[in-house]
Amino acid sequence: MTDLAAPLRRAAPALLGYAAVRTLGLVVLAVWSAARGKSAYTLLTARWDALWYTRVADLGYGYEVRLPNGDVHSNLAFFPLLPWLERALHAVSPLSYADGGFVVSLLASLAAAWGIFAVSEHVYGRRAGVCAVLLWAVLPVGIVQSMAYSESLFTALAAWSLYAVLTGRWLTAGTLALLAGLTRPVGLAVVAAVWVAGIVSFTSASTASTAVTPSASTPAPSFVRDRSTAPAPGAHSWRRALGMLIAPLGAAGYVLWVGHRTGKGPLGYLDVQAGWRNGFDGGAAFARFVGDKFTSFPSALAGVGLIVGVGLVLWLYVVGVRQGQPLPLLVYTGVVTALALCASSYFGSKPRLLMPAFPLLLPLALALARARTSRSAWVVGGVAVASAVYGAFWLNGSGPP
């Protein structure tokens, strides 16, 4: 407990700020929903993807909806970790499956905030870590962090896996990557980060072992900034190898299981996604979607907004590269961003799909950290109010993108 107390105290400002922002969002949602005669709790726990997760928790896999156009929406598209946790909470408490999903998301969102702080503090310092957490909290789609969705759970696992990589804890990194791979398809991004970091670490050790000076110690990779928490030079290479080995087992295991269940082999999961008209086309369909917005004047404004949004995402990634973000963060963010922007369907979902790519916020967090505290507080406070209002409007309207 003593070992946990010190890091928790360091993260306390970030976690308290995060809790305040999310509480504001929930209060505004409750007031807005009540004014419209709707239940805010139902919007958070029993609509859209949340229903698919609770059906998996309750009935298991095998449920599907056949649409008039021939599409088949199968619940095999939804990875199992969140439903497993919902089922576990239901089994040991009076909570319903939907209640369990809500509790998991609330706890996971706090764990994600702490993980984002840990990564950001490790790379850029405590003040930047607090700012990164607050920026993640005030995202326009931040209300999803409080929904019975898998985004918060995935972000928590991804952030702590990346932190484990940055500090040389390879078994922890691999285990968390395995769990992330059981949470969302984009778990591949965490696996890629672990593998690239591991390969670079092995290469660094190999290069050092052939140095001319026999007494030269094996240098840690450049992304391992905290030498006090990194493994001793040349030691525990088996942990690194084992961490890399177990990292992909979650995603690979579920995908192979779906292929076996559907009888379509290793690529069976792709057929399941095709039933949802979802796939990876390099962004061609998204580009056509944006282009179609310019066929009339009102929708052209939305098209401009989409172009600006994508440009901002790419610009933030380039700035992160120039600022020297550690390689595991760049790999993770690059894969998450590519999968989000290049998916061939659910174009309105892209802001939500980008939410786990929290390292994109680090350039903004650095800028905010360098500003005066009063100015930063006004900026965060204003954006938090706007985010809360947008989240309430959004859930009471078209719903999560």
Image (spheres, grey):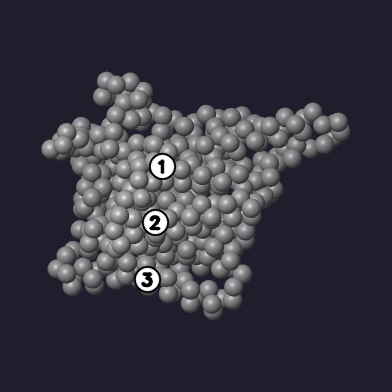
Q: Which residue is mark 1?
A: 283
Q: State the mark number for residue 306.
A: 2
Name of the residue lying farthest toward the bottom? 374
Q: Is residue 155 left or right of residue 33?
A: right
Looking at numbered disc 1 in the image, what kind of residue is underneath it?
A: Gly
Q: Is residue 32 visible?
A: yes
Q: State the mark number for residue 65.
A: none
* Percent x, y of residue 136: 45, 60
Q: Nearer the viewer, residue 25 or 86?
A: 25
* Percent x, y of residue 159: 49, 49
Please determine whether, in this image, residue 300 is positioned above or below residue 170: below
Q: State the mark number for residue 386.
A: 3
Residue appearing at x 21%, y 37% in the figure: 73
Quadrant for residue 255, please give it. Answer: top left
Looking at numbered disc 2 in the image, what kind of residue is underneath it?
A: Leu
Looking at numbered disc 3 in the image, what kind of residue is underneath it?
A: Ala
Residue appearing at x 33%, y 48% in the figure: 289
Query: Of the residues under marks 3 and 1, which one precedes in the sequence?
Result: 1
* Percent x, y of residue 335: 48, 42
Please determine whether, in this image, residue 264 is positioned above or below residue 339: above
Distance from Cα at disc 1 to Cα at disc 2: 13 Å
Q: Is residue 41 visible?
A: no
Q: Is residue 1 left or right of residue 224?
A: left
Distance from Cα at disc 2 to Cα at disc 3: 19 Å
Comparing marks 2 and 3, which lies closer to the viewer? 2
Crowd around label 1: few <14 · some 14–19 · many ≥20 (10 Å): some
